[in-house]
Image (cartoon, rainbow, N blue to C red):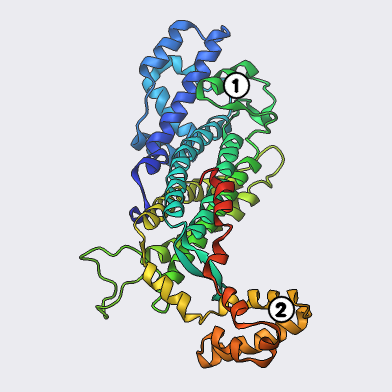
Amino acid sequence: MIPRYKRKEISEIWQPTNKFKIWLDIEILICEALCLKGEIPKKSLKSIKENAKFDINRIDEIERDVKHDVIAFLTNVAENVGSESRFIHKGVTSSDIIDTAFSIQLKKSCKILKKELIDLISTLKSKAIEHKKTECIGRSHGIFAEPTTFGLKMLGKYCEFQRHYKRLCEAEKEISICSISGAVGTYANINPFVENYVAKKLGLKSEDVATQIIPRDRHAYLFSTLALIASSIENLAIEVRHLHRSEVREVEEFFAEDQKGSSAMPHKKNPVLSENLTGLSRVIRSSCIPFMENIALWHERDISHSSVERTLAPDTIVLCDFALNRMKNIIENLVIDKKMMRENLKKTNGLFNSQRVMLELVKKGVSRESAYKFVQKVALQSWKNNKDFLTLLKKDKYIKSNLGNEEINKLFDLNHFFKNIETIYQRVLHEK
């Protein structure tokens, strides 16, 4: 991943040094288990622990000849351990080490992603509470609909990311798997005790049935979850972008004092962070299909999945971490213009009351089809000529024949649209 989108803590999980360190930890744990089973002398285990180390440059040098990264790693470790190295990697296969290490990297990454999700969820909750009564016009198809509150918009996103947190927790369980079962997964040359010992030490669960690898549906579940999270990040980013538009101006991304919006036009304040997240979400989401395709492997294993995991796994996870953190910062620092929200409500000329007028006519015994037809006629006049909807209703002969002026006035009470907001908040937050 290019430095522009990297954050240190999660990036370090995927550095080669950390990967080889995990490989070495797993190999030593296998030796510990074999020692407990009496298959490795205690003095040999002691020597392995004291001398086992690796050098990345040396591993790369060996790999250029042997064309196998695990063998290169083991050869380098053996150079440091000496004769006792004959006990290292006893009865296991490369995938036992690679897959179990991959599980650890994924699990550590999930821990960070969960923290970022919690921070975003908390920020959305704060905005939802703060702006529970901040009135604004709702839109469907990008067109004025009926009033809502900005807080309710944020509350909906709060719920959406809460669901993602639950999904990520489940996905984390799915990938927290240890497989130390040897060639084709039959434990022919390694006792299942070893796998259970290593799994317990690493906080993982032993695979139920491995082939020679951990089944890739587990990983597909995680990266499908990340794709869903990315889609919701994009959904929220697009909301910010639309509300930031010059014609709307209900919110703006925070704009620093020395920030510049355009190389040509000094007046520009562009929603660049949200636009960036829209693009990053596309990249994160695109990794979902390759991980699903990794499920279909030949017999007990092949390595067609390997290149996908080496490239897309770290990049997707690092990007998701970056995107969650950026989204949190956007919402936390969002500039919310209540005045423009009120102005946009006024721009509707009261048309958002059209459903109320129609339903009131239905109460008077008018058929729904007729009520819709006559209210629509007045509403379209209001929109086309930029005239006050209430005034036009009072002048319309058909409307007047069914509704008096006082009855019409009562239908234009803005508070009507917010009478159940508290109920929604109570249902979600269990508090008023």
Q: Which amino acid lies under the numbered mark 2 shown in the image of this protein?
A: Leu
Residue closer to the observer: 282 or 362: 362
Task: Name the element at disc 1.
Answer: helix
Q: Residues within 10 Å of mark 1 (few under 14, many from 20)?
A: many
Q: Residue 127: x, y in percent? A: 42, 54
Q: Which residue is mark 2?
A: 361
Q: How many marks?
A: 2
Residue 377 occupies which quadrant of the picture? bottom right
Label 1 and label 2: CA atoms lie apart by: 73 Å
Q: Residue at x 35, y 64 (%)?
A: 253
Residue closer to the observer: 327 or 382: 382
Q: Which residue is mark 1?
A: 195
Q: Residues within 10 Å of mark 2 (few under 14, many from 20)?
A: many
Q: Is residue 226 visible?
A: no
Residue 126: mark in rendering: none
Q: Residue at x 46, y 35 (%)?
A: 108
Q: Residue 38: x, y in percent? A: 56, 6
Q: Is residue 138 above or below residue 202?
A: below
Q: Residue at x 56, y 75 (%)?
A: 412
| Among the two numbered marks 1 and 2 on one chain, the one whose residue lies closer to the N terminus | 1
Q: Is residue 51 above or below residue 379?
A: above
Q: Which amino acid lies under the numbered mark 1 shown in the image of this protein?
A: Glu
Residue closer to the observer: 421 or 208: 421
- Compared across the picture, whether 300 is left or right of 13 comes to right
Task: Name the element at disc 2.
Answer: helix
Q: Residue at x 54, y 76 (%)?
A: 144
Q: Residue 218: x, y in percent? A: 63, 40
Residue closer to the observer: 253 or 21: 253
